[in-house]
């Protein structure tokens, strides 16, 4: 089957309005589609990410605000013992930095052996890996006595040289691509002190929830810290899933009864299940994903209807010509091929300016709204999707054209 381009272009030039309208529609569609698919991917990927935590086993305690200054080491130990003694509690750890929480957080700027610098979310506390239920895939957990002191009453977080750390697999792959993370050294870019990698956990999401769609959602590290003075006391509590709700209901009242006199009046202790916090934190992302998904579906539907309508219009206005070609021994395959080739030309007329517009829109979004750069791979993917949509939309009218009988050439004089 041979489909010369000149007759197709000549046929389109005789009735240029409809082809140009469809080409413009395709250009607009591909410009919006490439960016919408990119934005959809950025919203959906964190929703699908495995955060490495047994979600039905974790409670997070927050808003234990000291009435005067800070909690002391003795008070922190007493609260830990109280929580550990509750039936159904398997592990409890005071923490500086909790997943899905924005209070009492800190970050570290670290540089790997290859020179790659990363700002990672820090999670510090004795027994924190066990309380969070993180899966240790390499190395070991922290040992007693390895932790540094966190005394916020007298200063910030000062991490001494040689402190052991546990990385996520994502950071281990970044800094140690050969798989030799254990024993590796990381440099603190703001202090020149080094840390030593002693273990690797499978996953742990950052608590900067607005930074989960930049490819760095798993850039988190664990540090051993003995928390001796903090103004706000936070806990990670791992529980028996069968008794989680009972522990969550009993815990606030027990803490209020025992330590209410030491807590700031009017600020109740907050106990949340990790599942509930995650659901609330990602609610806006789910809404955005539905929005972008709807936009994509509407664009594809409208564009498909436009292309299908044009193809049907061509068939109706050229029944006699189709009949003549059939009378001159053109096969049904030839007729279908000609219709689809015409459609490919029209769609192609819209794809090139549409791809340029897609890139320009992304540049504007980067400057006006600090959106990430659109990967160039999305441009050919969007073009391919529109091209396949055009073929599908034109296939029905093309098959109807192939069924036109040769006798119609004589009846449509």
Image (spheres, helix red, strand yellow):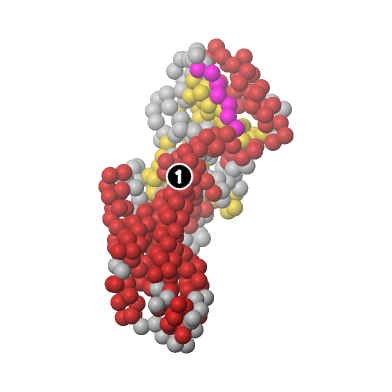
Given residues 158 and 272, the one toward you in this image is 272
In what element is the residue under mark 1? helix
Within the image, what quadrant is residue 77 found in? top right
Q: Position of residue 202 (x, y in %)?
A: 56, 51
Q: Position of residue 407 (x, y in %)?
A: 49, 81
Given residues 283 and 118, the one toward you in this image is 283
Within the image, what quadrant is residue 8 found in? bottom left
Quarter of the figure that contains the C terminus: bottom left
Does residue 64 appear anywhere in the picture?
yes
Q: Is residue 83 left or right of residue 154?
A: right
Residue at 33%, 66% in the rendered image: 19
Residue at 58%, 34% in the rendered image: 276
Does residue 73 appear anywhere in the picture?
no
Q: Position of residue 379 (x, y in %)?
A: 37, 62
Q: Which residue is mark 1?
A: 291
Given residues 274 and 358, the one toward you in this image is 358
Q: Which residues are magenta?
A: 267-273
Residue at 43%, 83% in the rendered image: 325
Q: Position of residue 129 (x, y in %)?
A: 58, 41
């Amino acid at each position: 089957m041979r489909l010369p381009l000149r007759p197709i272009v000549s046929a389109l030039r005789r009735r240029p309005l409809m082809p140009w309208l469809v080409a413009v529609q395709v250009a607009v569609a591909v410009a919006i589609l490439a960016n919408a698919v990119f934005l959809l991917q950025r919203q959906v990927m964190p929703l699908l990410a495995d955060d490495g935590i047994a979600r039905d086993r974790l409670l997070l305690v927050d808003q234990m605000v000291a009435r005067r200054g800070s909690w002391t080491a003795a008070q922190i130990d007493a609260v830990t013992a109280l929580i550990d003694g509750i039936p159904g509690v398997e592990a409890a750890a005071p923490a500086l930095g909790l997943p899905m929480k924005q209070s009492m957080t800190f970050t570290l700027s670290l540089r790997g052996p290859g020179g790659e610098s990363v700002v990672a979310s820090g999670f510090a506390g004795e027994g924190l890996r066990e309380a969070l239920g993180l899966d240790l895939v390499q190395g070991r957990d922290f040992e007693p006595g390895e932790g540094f002191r966190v005394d916020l009453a007298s200063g910030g977080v000062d991490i001494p040289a040689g402190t052991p750390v546990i990385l996520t697999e994502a950071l281990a792959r970044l800094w140690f691509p050969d798989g030799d993370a254990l024993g590796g050294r990381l440099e603190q870019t703001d202090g020149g002190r080094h840390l030593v990698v002693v273990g690797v956990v499978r996953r742990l999401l950052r608590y900067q929830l607005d930074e989960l769609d930049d490819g760095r959602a798993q850039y988190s590290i664990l540090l051993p810290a003995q928390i001796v003075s903090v103004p706000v006391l936070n806990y990670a509590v791992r529980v028996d899933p069968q008794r989680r709700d009972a522990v969550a209901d009993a815990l606030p009242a027990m803490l209020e009864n025992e330590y209410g006199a030491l807590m700031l009046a009017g600020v109740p202790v907050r106990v949340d299940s990790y599942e509930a916090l995650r659901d609330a934190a990602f609610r806006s992302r789910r809404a955005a994903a539905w929005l972008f998904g709807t936009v994509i579906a509407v664009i594809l539907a409208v564009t498909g209807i436009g292309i299908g309508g044009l193809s049907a219009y061509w068939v109706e206005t050229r029944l006699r010509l189709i009949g003549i070609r059939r009378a001159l021994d053109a096969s049904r395959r030839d007729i279908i091929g000609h219709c689809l080739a015409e459609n490919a030309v029209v769609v192609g007329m819209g794809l090139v300016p549409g791809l340029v517009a897609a890139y320009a829109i992304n540049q504007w979004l980067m400057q006006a709204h600090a959106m990430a750069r659109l990967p160039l791979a999305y441009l050919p993917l969007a073009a391919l999707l529109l091209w396949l949509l055009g073929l599908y939309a034109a296939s029905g009218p093309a098959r109807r054209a192939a069924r036109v009988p040769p006798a119609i050439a004589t009846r449509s004089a």
